[in-house]
Image: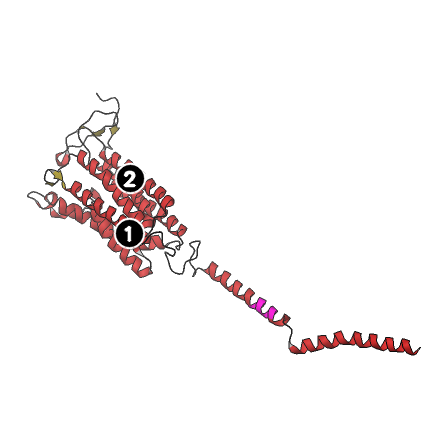
Amino acid sequence: MELAYIPSPARGVLYLGPIPLRGYAFCIIIGVFVAVWLGNKRWVARGGRPGTVADIAVWAVPFGLVGGRLYHVITDYELYFSEGRDWVDAFKIWEGGLGIWGAIALGAVGAWIGCRRRGIPLPAWADAVAPGIAFAQAFGRWGNWFNQELYGRETHVPWALHITSSTDGRVPGYYHPTFLYESLWCVGVGFLVIWADRRFKLGHGRAFALYVAAYCVGRAWIEYMRVDDAHHILGVRLNDWTAIGVFLLAVVYIVLSSRKRPGREEIVEPGASDTGTGADDPVDLGKDEDKATTDKATASGKATDKPTDRDKDEAEDEDAEPSEKTESAAESAKKV
C-alpha cells in the first residue's frame, strides 16, 4: 500500500450539457494566455506597442498547434495508420498528442508571417515571448496528467503518479510523474531566461535560443525516463536525438549571433515610443498636437518679441532725447 502518491483524475473531461470540457484543452489555453500576457509585458518594456504580441500570436498559435500535431502523428504514425486503427483519430487533437518540436518549428513560421505583416524583426519578438512559452509548456504538461499519459518508469517514491486507466495498453500502477518533472523544469527555464535577459541584455534571438537550449537539456533526461512506446535510433529514443540536435543548433546560434550582432536591438517596433505605447495611439497624437501648438505659440512669441530695425531706431531716438534735453538745460544755466 502506497502511503503517498499523486492521484490521477478519474476522467479528463466534464460535460456542460452537450458541451465537453476537456482538461487537456484547458491546460493549453491557459498556457497560451500566460505566454501572450507575459510576452506583451516584455515587448512593451523593450519599446514595442501593447497588443503586438497578441496580434502575432493569432498567427503563431494555430500554426504551432498544427505543427505539434503533425510532428506527433508522423513520429507515432502507427497509432493512427496501423492495422486496427482509425486514421480519423489523427485529427482528434483534444485526446492529446502534441510534439513541442513541431509546435515551435511551424509556430515560428506563423510568427514570421505575423511579424512580416507588422514590419518588426522576428528575433526580437521571439526574445520577448521566450519565457512565456516555457511557462505555457509548464501548464500544458498538466494536460498529460488529465489524460493519464507520458509517465515514466515504475517507482515507489512518495510523489509517484498513480495510473488507474488500462486503455491503450496502460498498466495500472505507480510511475515517475514525468509530466510533473517537465512542468517544473519549464518553470525553471522560464525564470532562467528572464534572469539571463536582464543580466546580459540578450537580443537578436539569443533569449529565445537560450530557452530552446535549456529546455532541450531537461527534455533529454526526462525523455530517457519515459516508458511509452517510441521509435529508437541506435538504442536512443527519437526525441532524445531531436533534443541533442536542437540543443547544438541553439548553442551555435548564440555564439555566432553574439559575435556578429552583440547587444540588444535599440528599436523593436518602428513608430513605437520608448514606453511601448504606439506613436499612432490617440493619446500620443493628442500630446503631439499639443506640443506642436505650444511650439508654434512659442515660435510666434519669439517672432513678436524680436525687435525690428524700426524698433531699434525708435529706441535710439528715445535714448537720444534725454541727452538733448540735458544739454539744453546746461546751456540755459550758463546764460543765466
Question: Which of the 4 quarters of the picture holds residue 238?
Answer: top left
Does 271 sit left or right of 241 as displayed? Answer: right
- Quick check: 188 above or below 161? below
Does 150 sit left or right of 271 as displayed? Answer: left
Q: Quadrant of the N terminus?
A: top left
Q: Residues within 10 Å of mark 2 (few under 14, many from 20)?
A: many
Mark toward the viewer: 2 or 1: 1
Q: Amino acid at mark 1?
A: Ser
Q: Residue furthest right?
A: 336
Q: Which residue is mark 1?
A: 257
Which segment is the magenta one?
Answer: 296-302
Sequence-first tag of 2 and 1: 2
Asked if the residues shown at circle 2 and circle 1 are in contact, with their CB atoms under 8 angstroms apart, the answer is: no
Indicate the position of residue 184 as horizontal and vertical percent values: 29, 36
Q: Amino acid at mark 2?
A: Cys
Q: Residue furthest left?
A: 83
Task: Look at 76% across and 76% down and name the residue there.
Answer: 320
Q: Does the magenta portion include 328?
A: no
Q: Residue furthest front?
A: 334
Q: Which residue is mark 2?
A: 186
Task: Look at 11% across and 47% down and name the residue there.
Answer: 87
Q: Is residue 200 visible?
A: yes
Task: Tell me the distance, in whole angstroms, between the alpha carbons under discs 2 and 1.
Answer: 24 Å
- Quick check: 243 above or below 278? above
* Magenta segment, prevailing SS (helix, strand or loop): helix
Indicate the position of residue 182 as horizontal and vertical percent values: 25, 37
Indicate the position of residue 15 as horizontal and vertical percent values: 26, 40
Q: Quadrant of the C terminus?
A: bottom right
Which sits in the foreground, 274 or 166? 274
Indicate the position of residue 127 as horizontal and vertical percent values: 32, 49
